[in-house]
Image (cartoon, helix red, strand yellow):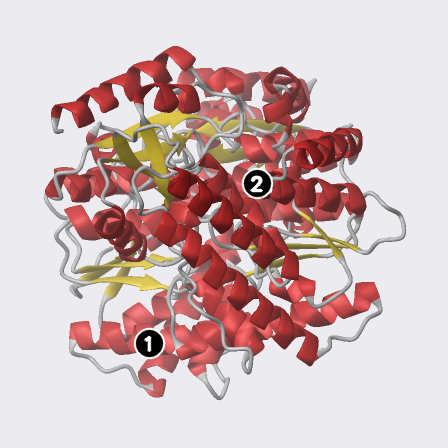
Amino acid sequence: MLNKYYTEMKSSLEAAYQQKPRAATKMTIQLASTFVEAYRADKNVVWTSFYSFPMELLAAFDVTPFDFEIAANLLPTFSADAAVEIMNRAEEVGYSTDICSYHRLAAGCDMEGYMPRADLLLSSSYFCDGKAKTNKTLADRYGKEAISLDIPNKISPESVDYVAGQLRRIASRIESISGQKLDLERLRECIRVSNRARRAYEQLADLQKVSPFPYIGVPVINMSIFGNMLAGKEIQEQIYLELVDESRKKIMEGKLTPEKYRVLWLAWFPVQPTVITQIFRKNGVTIVMGELARNYGGGMDESLPFESLALWCLRNPYVGAIEQRLKGINEIIDEYNLDGVVHFSTDACRHSCAAQKLIGDVMKERNIPYLVLDGDMSDKRKYSPERTEMLLENFIGIMAGRK
Amino acid sequence: MSDSRAKMGYFCSLVPTEVIAAAGYEPVWVKGRAEMTAAADAQMYPNMCPYIKSLFTDAAESGGNGFDGLVFARSCDGVRRLYDVWKAYIPSKFIYMLEVPKNADDLAVTYYASQLHDFAAQIGKSSGCEITASTLRKAIKDANAARGKMRELHSRQSASPLPMSGSELFMQGIQMLHGDDGAKGGPATRRKSSAEDAAAGSRKKTRVMVCGNVMSRPDILLMIEGSGAEVPVADVCTGLRSFERIVDEKGDDPFLSLAEAYLGLPRCSRTAEPAETYARIRDNVNRYNVNGVVLTALKFCDQQLYDIPYLLKKLNDDGVPVLFVENDYVFTDKDRIRTRVEAFVEMLES
């Protein structure tokens, strides 16, 4: 089912791109193509996490990456009802509905036989416990090895050594399944390419400071999640530069809807269809930046490839104490001239939601309207359009009262 | 049972209490509150593990925590975030977040040993008692001896009839970890009288093992025992798993010995692969001559909940009767759980 879905998605996106070439479409074609490729018998398929694994390491090999979370959870964008049916399968065998819908859906897809073969399963310990747990359970089903890249809570010479050491071992495991020796010079080139893409992305992040910003912001947030899939590949820089050109062109032409309110989006954006974008569009609200769309990693030093990749992981705002996350949020607020902050509170996301009150206290001190918007990433049973609309309308009312 | 030393609280059995003791503190496993209140929901996300909320509630409502310091560990998303919220809202004399790797290979052991050095330096500074290799070795020896006594008691539990009821053994463990009788909140189910026990002694009892994560109360064990079965062992974080660890007393580097022991067996769902968790359950089923298994998990505990479907399937495939019950740490829904437990025991006996 997923293979068919991604094959059709790829074809229709390619047709759309022929009609109207857009960078966001190009990125999604890359995503669909990668997933379609993962079903090919002649490929070495490495399951991984696009947004929380240093993908430059995989780019240094001829392997096909596959992200079970993203692959399964594009389904609700297509049919939220079908996604619920598949989640039900997982719940029938004991997956609690208190578990993240991302993982219930992935487990259900696996049980239905929708997933591609895995030769090696990589995950990481940060962002959440559930991702690595699901990875391990699925690996056991396939009789394959699961490796969790353990990211400590603090940056120190010891933690960098620890993560770099794990990455070296992972490289050696990829060598085993691919039959290809790691070429250190190729890895260094991947890091150079990634640095260039990051600089291109920075240009886009700078453009987002312009008001009105030509996009509502969701594609930018999505790119920060999917985009890392291409880290270490030339096409990542190309796509970011095209997006920069598109944005500049729109700004210069001045054919933009007036922007009334600029908000920062914290944590995740739901993949299931919601009324959020529609309400924002109607009220002139632009998501100018996503917390996770920001570049926290800085540049990487290709002369120390493993240590640089380790640092990229360790600098993630979700690693470490809340101060690291708050620092990033405060910097975005300082740089982007915001009217409000929305924290999307997906039901089972304990790592992001646990500190939402604490973040609220900081927003209160800064006198910035703050909304905790509860809902769910993929499970329509835990999403209420009426409640979402009420919360957003109230929030917009508060922002309006301060103008 | 508590001694005159200042008390240092800890939450997770992956924290080496030997380091705390070597710094001159009495290590005390923190139980949290026996009843849940709204304090945690006001400042934390409601869908957090109830043990974490219980800890926060207790501290928030008592205006502190009654300890001279607290040691957190990077054990799960929940505790990581509890640390954040605790720092912000609870005044504390000393708090420390211990880096416990999630992996258990040689790289992880080396890293953990380096973190234990830092932990020892910080906690030693807090107590004014510098930790040396010699003081740490003594603490290791003492802790091994204390755990050894509990291991010995557990090892006798494979016998039939049981030398000690599972609930009594469990509470003895809680007493050792927490320093009191741990009975706050009271038993959830009436224990059988001596006469009833004697009458029942003539027949061989059904044996049920409890497996899960953090428990401070014997409610589930008492429910099983109240249903006429016996519980040889509770393989939970605050039960058997806490006492099986043996630290090498003769290693050249005591920090490395601690790191090896605490990342080594037995491991909980946080660190272990699901297959390892299952192998341990299966092994204990044989060792303790168990007829059925009650798997229990704290609500919202991702580490445990993700393993449940796998464990249920494996146990069912192997023909080991199993019952899964979620609990909210303080057993507010004990009647519902009791009904399920009684039905399970009845099924085993039939």
The chain letter under disc 1 is B
State left or right for residue A222 relative to residue B62. right
- Which residue corresponds to mark 1? B118
Task: Sort mark 1 into few (<14), some (14-19) or many (20+) by Cα contacts within 10 Å.
Answer: some
For residue A24, the mark is: 2
Amino acid type, residue under disc 1 in the picture:
Asp
Task: Sort mark 2 into few (<14), some (14-19) or many (20+) by Cα contacts within 10 Å.
Answer: some
Residue B57 in picture, x, y percent from top left: 22, 37
How far apart marks 1 and 2 lie (CA) works out to 47 Å
The chain letter under disc 2 is A
Foreground pick, B343 / A142: A142
Residue A60 in picture, x, y percent from top left: 70, 68
State left or right for residue A28 relative to residue A64. left
Foreground pick, B98 / B138: B98
**Considering the numbered disc 2 on the image, is that residue within a helix, a strand or a loop?**
helix
Quadrant position of residue B272: bottom right
Image quarter in which the N terminus of chain A is found = top right
